[in-house]
Amino acid sequence: MTEPGPFAALPRPPVVLQVLPRLNAGGGVERGTVDVAAAIVAAGGTALVASAEGPLTRELARAGARHIALPLTRKGPLAIWRNARRLAEIIAAEGVDIVHARSRAPAWSAWFACRRTGARFVTTYHGTYNEGLPGKRRYNAIMARGERVIAISEFIAGHLVARHGTDPARVRVIPRGIDPVRFDPARTAADRWMALARRWSLPDGAPLVLLPGRLTRWKGQLVAVEAMARIQRRDAVLVLAGDDEGRTGYRTELEDRIKALGLLGRVRLVGHCDDMPAAMMLASVVLSASTDPEAFGRVAVETQAMGRPVIATDHGGARETVIAGETGLLVPPNDANALAAAIDQALALSEPERAALAFRARENVLAHFTRARMCADTLAVYAELMATGAAAAADRGP
């Protein structure tokens, strides 16, 4: 028997408009937007996405969703008002039921448009957001104003309540999900990771320690470099796989520290990697060494899906995605000695121990952190809002 879909109990499937700045490739916000749009279409709903053009626009169309080009990257007050007016026109013309905002400037425009049209307003709170400038907390607070606020981890849910006083009854914790088919060791052909090994000029037989992530200080590359100077396995190679995105000063600082520690040849800065499953298959251990808490921490989940040992810092979302001692290791943030000891521990695992960890790690992901589960839970939030609207309308009567 076929199970009823998420919108089966509704009078009709909803029209959902997601808003974000741009459909860039590689980002978790953008990837999640496309995944949820595809799930809406598969469930019989209508999926619209408003943003500036980006690399994922074609993929959105292939999923059966429709893209509406709007300059939602602009953050000035006048641009926000103009976008609000345009979004209100779209809501009216398309019969939009729910607007789902995934970033702050588009969320302000969407909130004004929903107040004008009566559409339901949902937000996803993706990070802790910097508050260094005056007025920034008020600007950030729009992400806590949804009728339902999706938090991507329990850590973020706690942050919402503590920072914005959000009513916990409006918060729904929906962890980000990965594609377990893409991140599957059985589907990652050897020629893919062998090609990376040649591209990165890795020594034959050397254990690879991999740290994926853009080159920015809080991702912990400097801590990893310091740890490499202290590990016992002197043959191990650390690969920092990520683009500097114009942060040339930080890249130079990394290069200078690598040289000062005598790690030339043992630490490689390889730039962006477009085949992360292959990179993880090549790795003996993967690091998520962030010095600030990750709101979720996709690297730790992807690594577990690939059955590789992961070492993450013991704060933020990693406490929820990594089961310490069972599916990976957790170390204090900014502690090069602890990270070095954990790397040596992971590299010393026997083959049976690695196999047992790989099984537990992948099972953890399949149970809690898949794209299918994330989409199903998000569509359930939409259905919940639609049902409450229908009930309220019935109570009002004709």
Image (spheres, rainbow, N blue to C red):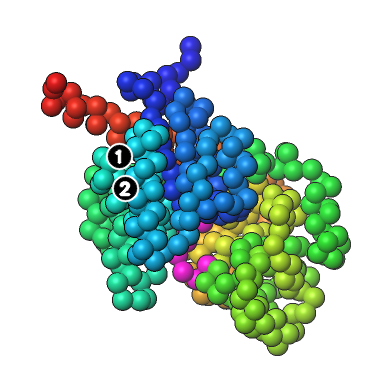
Q: Nearer the viewer, mark 1 or mark 2?
A: 2
Q: Is residue 166 shown above or below 147?
A: below
Q: Is residue 339 magenta?
A: no
C-alpha separation, residue under disc 1 versus residue under disc 2 = 8 Å
Q: Nearer the viewer, residue 264 or 361?
A: 264
Residue holding disc 2: 113
Q: Residue at x 73, y 39 (%)?
A: 187
Q: Residue at x 73, y 85 (%)?
A: 259
Q: Secondary structure at mark 1?
A: loop
Q: Nearer the viewer, residue 194 or 307?
A: 194
Magenta region: which residues? Answer: 290-297
Residue holding disc 1: 119
Contact between labelled residues 2 and 1, with CB atoms less than 8 Å apart: yes
Q: Secondary structure at mark 2?
A: helix
* Most common SS among magenta residues: loop
Q: Which mark is residue 395?
A: none
* Residue 178 seen anywhere in this rendered image of the structure: yes
Q: Is residue 93 shown above or below 139?
A: above
